[in-house]
Amino acid sequence: SGQALALAVVNGQLETLSAEQRVAWALEHLPGEFVLSSSFGIQAAVCLHLVTRIRPDIPVILTDTGYLFPETYRFIDQLTDQLKLNLQVFRAEQSPAWQEARYGKLWEQGVEGIEKYNQINKVEPMNRALETLGAQSWFAGLRREQSGSRANLPVLAVQRGVF
């Protein structure tokens, strides 16, 4: 399609740019309302700093599963304070305790259980965040070296009408 071809051309150009130049390009050329999502993993500070240095007030989406490590919650607090993040937290509509009472420990129930857990705790809250915040362009912070399935990720993609 025309869109696929245009994306391929743009991705070719973006591949030659630094991470900071890519962020600046996106903020200049893509439709905004812009959002940034973060898992607040160990590498998160780099991406958060990179984007918020250029766009300090960007909403930063965290999908809180209720099962993060105490160190992760402290790291979130620390980065939110240091970088003055516009943190927007979204959670499943049912608490972790209620989910366990209703379904048991989904993550112990094989692939199907993990998929249901991810749908309830990650996918649905993220979709709600994108809708609530009116996101048109989303900095996802996915890195190619994180897994084999991400190795061929393009710099820019369109997913359900959001860049």
Image (cartoon, rainbow, N blue to C red):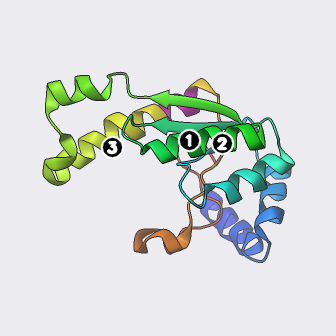
Residue 130 drawn in magenta: yes
Distance from label 3 to label 2 (Cα)? 26 Å
Residue 9 drawn in magenta: no
Q: Quadrant of residue 34?
A: top right
Q: In the image as oriented, which residue stretches furthest toward the bottom? A: 16
Q: Quadrant of residue 135?
A: top right
Earlier residue among tags 3 and 2: 2
Q: Is residue 49 visible?
A: yes
* Rendered image: mark on residue 95: none
Q: Tell how many labels.
A: 3
Distance from label 1 to label 3 (Cα)? 23 Å
94 sits left or right of 55 in the view? left
Residue 16, how many percent across, how many down?
A: 78, 77
Q: Quadrant for the N terminus, please.
A: bottom right
Distance from label 2 to label 1 (Cα)? 6 Å
* Rendered image: mark on residue 74: 1
Q: Nearer the viewer, residue 107 or 162?
A: 107
SS at circle 2: helix
Mark 1 residue type: Arg
Q: Tell me the residue that label 2 is attached to.
A: 78
Q: Which residues are magenta?
A: 127-131
